[in-house]
Amino acid sequence: MPRLEAHVRLFPVAAKPFRAPAAAKLAGTASWYGRHWEGRLTASGARFDPHRLTAAHRSLPLNTRVRVTNLENAKSVTVLINDRGPYVAGRVIDLSTAAARRLGMIKEGLAPVRIKVLGPKPPVAKPTLASATSTFAPVVTPAPVPRRRVGYAVPALAGLAAAAILIVSLLLGWRRWAGFS
């Protein structure tokens, strides 16, 4: 049998520098969203928490810190862009409940704001051996226990044929799991 070889070339990719968008897009109307979206996944992959200082923006890079200033009362707050939106015409940013509360816009629901891009979120410092003291014991994690994976084929059929195939696959799966075949 002939051997197939894949030829892969790796090209170095330079990191793109962070660029703030045009200032004209960074002023407009802000809205807020809260408990209805709590626990749902955001565009960054994190779960939405209305008690954290986060926001949704259409085009700013995810994990960008911005300072949002309410133009009616001059209150400001620094938030992290971790989601996409708003999807309503005329709005430039959706704030979490905590951020809206700090800006004093909970009652009104909407407020004119100015947005200043502060830059990407600073990286979290990872602990090093030099920062560890001798009073801490090393953490030993046990090796993962291999588990048997039993999968069932769910046919895309309808009626009695689908039920029969599902029952047979369940029985075969049980027999394999019990060690009969």
Image (tube, helix red, strand yellow):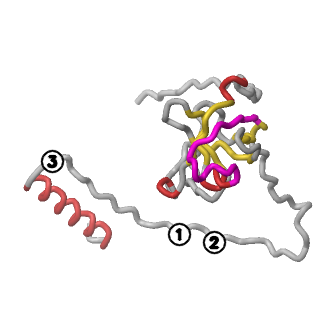
Would you say 73 lies left or right of 125 here?
left
Which label lies toward us, 3 or 2? 3
Locate residue 95, reporting x and y percent.
61, 46
Would you say 123 lies left or right of 57 here?
right
Q: What stretch is highlighted in magenta?
A: 102-117
Along the line of sight, the residue nearer the viewer: 127 or 56: 56
Q: Check disc 2 and give the amino acid type.
A: Pro
**Mark pair 3, 1: CA separation:** 36 Å
Would you say 103 lies left or right of 151 here?
right
Q: Mark 1 points at which residue?
A: 145
Along the line of sight, the residue nearer the viewer: 18 or 70: 70
Along the line of sight, the residue nearer the viewer: 49 or 142: 49
**Which of marks 1 and 3 precedes in the sequence?**
1
The image quarter containing residue 23 is top right
Q: Mark 3 points at which residue?
A: 157
Q: Check disc 3 and give the amino acid type.
A: Leu
Quadrant in which the N terminus is drawn: top left
Q: Mark 2 points at which residue?
A: 142
Q: Check disc 1 and give the amino acid type.
A: Val
Which label lies toward us, 3 or 1? 3
Q: Are marks 3 and 2 in contact (CB under 8 Å)?
A: no
Q: Are marks 1 and 2 in contact (CB under 8 Å)?
A: yes
Magenta stretch holds residue 109: yes
